[in-house]
Amino acid sequence: MTALPHKVAVIGAGEIGCGWAALCASAGWPVTVFDASARTLERASIEVPRRARALVALERATQGIVERGLLEFQQGRSLLQAVQDADWVIEAIPEDLLAKQKLFAAVEEVAGAETLVTSSSSGLPPSEVFARCRRQDRCLVAHPLNPPELIPLVEVVPSPRTGAPWVTRAHDYLQALGRMPIVIRKAVPGYVVGRVSAAVWRECVDLVLTGVIDVDGLDRAVSLGPAFGWAAAGPHLTYHLAAGEGGVTLFLQRLLASFEEWWSGLATWNRLEPEQQRALIQAIDRAYKGKLAALGEARDKRLSALLRALEQARTEV
Ligand SMILES: NC(=O)c1ccc[n+]([C@@H]2O[C@H](COP(=O)([O-])OP(=O)(O)OC[C@H]3O[C@@H](n4cnc5c(N)ncnc54)[C@H](O)[C@@H]3O)[C@@H](O)[C@H]2O)c1
């Protein structure tokens, strides 16, 4: 059994870094955050406690444990001070390969020999992210979903040089945080979550930009349509269950021809031109403008309600 970390260092205190820090603090773990921007670090000193305490209100964490964790929540004065003595370093700086490579080379200079090092990258190959590290055995990607303190899934992506005991350690830390780690065997760009999201989102954007439906209608159609079913059973199980006893064999006989016709007409573009970006932004603004904070809070409330329902419905099969 892996011992819990005595200290976690989170490097980069933006959206994801604050989420990781709030999650660790909510488990009572001592966390130090560091950011290259003093202003962002200052903001994190308010944002991390706010997000950790919000978990109590959402019934995802216990007040006493959160407050204990927050007592040991610190802003690092330097990378050295943040990383020193940490058992786990979580990187959450922007998705820029060169910046991540430089950061990990600097982290390596100050991290202890037994420190686990993970990147929050959304899709970069870990063999490239850690290319400048001498010790690549203890490095891997742990890709969270946003917000990391609420959505339990984390994609664990080792490189060919990651050591098995370090994958186990990352897995154990994540499980201790109530996460659901899934190990990705081949580090394809975007891993699994990013690729599926990109494929679905391209079609969603296309349906809006070609006037088939407006943003609000599309979002409802996906949330209450495929995404609603997929929250209970993934796409393969959903279709395996869609033709009664005949399972996926019968489903394919009945509907494959329709799917093939639809596939042949799906969007295939791989660039969103500036005028299309403007049109998309306008359409999304029309649907949601001026309500971002309230919409975020309402989304988090629905997420925690869904999690509770899924936990209560957990079965053996
Ligand atoms: N936002 C998401 O939905 C999401 C989801 C999952 C994973 N990710 C991944 O997480 C990572 C962080 O994303 P984000 O959305 O939090 O970005 P962000 O821009 O909100 O935050 C990044 C922070 O890193 C800081 N930073 C930049 N260089 C630094 C350095 N060398 N040392 C210390 N701090 C530095 C910046 O000042 C900034 O505050 C990215 O790799 C991203 O792909 C993002």
Image (cartoon, rainbow, N blue to C red):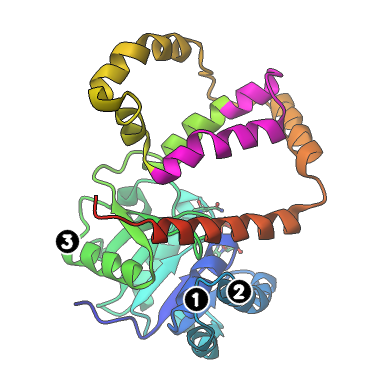
**Nearer to us in this view, 65 or 158:** 65
Q: Which residue is mark 3?
A: 164
Pointer 1 residue Cβ closer than 8 Å to ligand 1: no
**How far apart are the alpha carbons under marks 3 and 2?**
38 Å
Magenta range is: 204-232
Residue 82: percent from left, percent from top? 47, 80
Q: Which residue is mark 2?
A: 57
Q: Which residue is mark 1?
A: 61
At 42% across and 43% down in the image, what residue appears? 193
The amino acid type found where label 3 is placed reads Ala
Quarter of the image where one finds residue 233: top left
At 49% across and 61% down in the image, what residue appears? 148
- Whether residue 150 is in magenta: the answer is no
Contact flag, marks 3 and 2 (Cβ < 8 Å): no
The answer to whether 112 appears left or right of 161 in the picture is: right
Categorize mark 1 by other alpha carbons within 10 Å: few (<14), some (14-19), many (20+). Answer: some
**How far apart are the alpha carbons under marks 2 and 1?**
8 Å
**How far apart are the alpha carbons under marks 3 and 1?**
31 Å
Residue 232: percent from left, percent from top? 41, 45
Residue 215 visible in this rendered orientation of the protein? yes
